[in-house]
Structure formats: structure tokens, C-alpha cells
Image: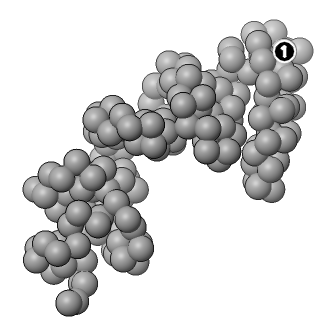
Amino acid sequence: MNAILRQRIGRVRREAEGYLELGMPEHALAVLQKHGKLTHGDARGCYLLGESLRELHRYRQAVYPLQRSLELIPDDVNVHMALAWCYKRTGQLQLAIDLLEHALQIEPGAAILHYNLACYWSLACDRRRTLQYLAAALEIDGNFRDFVWDEPDFDPMRSDPLFRSLTGMTA
């Protein structure tokens, strides 16, 4: 990519990032779409496009740019998480799990990956894996315990005695 194109995509990215930081995903989306060809050739541009769509709850549409971003930067755990989020919300739970399992190979110490895997395995009604990943998340970062109470993904586990013990939930 020549210097002029790098400069141009840099400006587009900064503008989109600014809109996303301000909670204006529709504006970020418009900027990225306006520069579509440039955006689709750039890993970060694709990620921002996917994030814009994800924040607008357009999960199916977000999948393609996030997949493209992952093709361009396969070791970016943030892209893995965003794409898994979209897979989960489009009824592709096993793809979400597989993607996060792969991300965990890249960053095994990331508590958020363990926590999200616990959520997804809970939805899949796999008690053993839910408890395994949740225990790992809490061991890495005990602050995740604060999120368990309000996380609807754990509803299938709420009455499980081991889950209640692990999370400190009382009857």
C-alpha cells in the first residue's frame, strides 16, 4: 500500500474510531462504507466496520467484515471475540465456541476469553466445561465474579450447587 493510501485509511480509521468512542456507530459505519474498497483491504478498517455493525445489532452483516479482518490479522483476540459475539447472536453457538477456543491458544491468560467460553458452554448446557472455564476466569481475575449475577447466559447453571459455590451465590 502506498503512502497516500496508508494516510487515507489512517484518517478513515481515526474518524470511525472517534465516532465509535462517542457511541455513534451509524456515523462510523457511514464513514467506513463511503471508503468501502479501502476499508475492505485493511484489517483494522474491516474490524471497525464489523464493530459498527455489531453495535447496531446487525450481527449477520457484521460477520463478513470481521471474518475478513481475521483473515488479515489472524492473531487478534479482539477480532475473535467480536466475531464470536456475532456468531452467538446469529444462532451459531458452536462456531462462537470454536473461535474462542482458538483465541485461547493465542492468549491463554485472558480472563475474558475463559469467562466468555463459560457463558457459551453454559448456553450449550455443558456443565463440566462451564465450570472449568468459569473457574479459570475467576482464578485469573476474581472481578469477573461481579458479572455472573446479571449474566443471563448462566441461567441454565443457576441451580447447580458447584456453580453456586464457585460464584459465591447463596440460596
Residue positioned 51% across, 24% down in the render = 67
Name the residue furthest bottom: 171
Front-most of residues 42 and 108: 42
Three-letter code for the amino acid on which mark 1 is drawn: Leu
Crowd class of label 1 (few under 14; some 14 to 19; many from 20; radius 10 Å): few
Judge left or right: residue 59 versus residue 102. Answer: right
* Residue 63, image x, y percentages: 53, 28
| Residue 91 location, quadrant | top left
Q: Quadrant of the C terminus?
A: bottom left
The N terminus lies in quadrant: top right
Q: Is residue 110 left or right of residue 161?
A: right
- Colouring scheme, one of rainbow, by chain, secondary structure, one colour: one colour
Question: Residue, x 67% and y 45% (percent of image)?
Answer: 56
Residue 125 in view: yes
Image coords of residue 17 (percent x, y): 77, 43
**Residue 158 position (above or below residue 31):** below
Residue 118 at x, y percent in the picture: 27, 56
Q: Please state which of residues 40 and 120 is positioned toward the viewer in this rendering.
A: 120
Residue 112, horizontal then vertical, whole percent: 40, 56
Q: Quadrant of residue 14?
A: top right
Q: Nearer the viewer, residue 97 or 72?
A: 97
Q: At 28% across and 35% down in the image, what residue appears?
A: 94
Judging from the image, what secondary structure is the residue with disc 1 in?
helix
Residue annotated with mark 1: 5
Q: Is residue 86 above or below residue 123?
A: above
Q: Residue at x 39, y 67 (%)?
A: 151
89 left or right of 47 in image: left
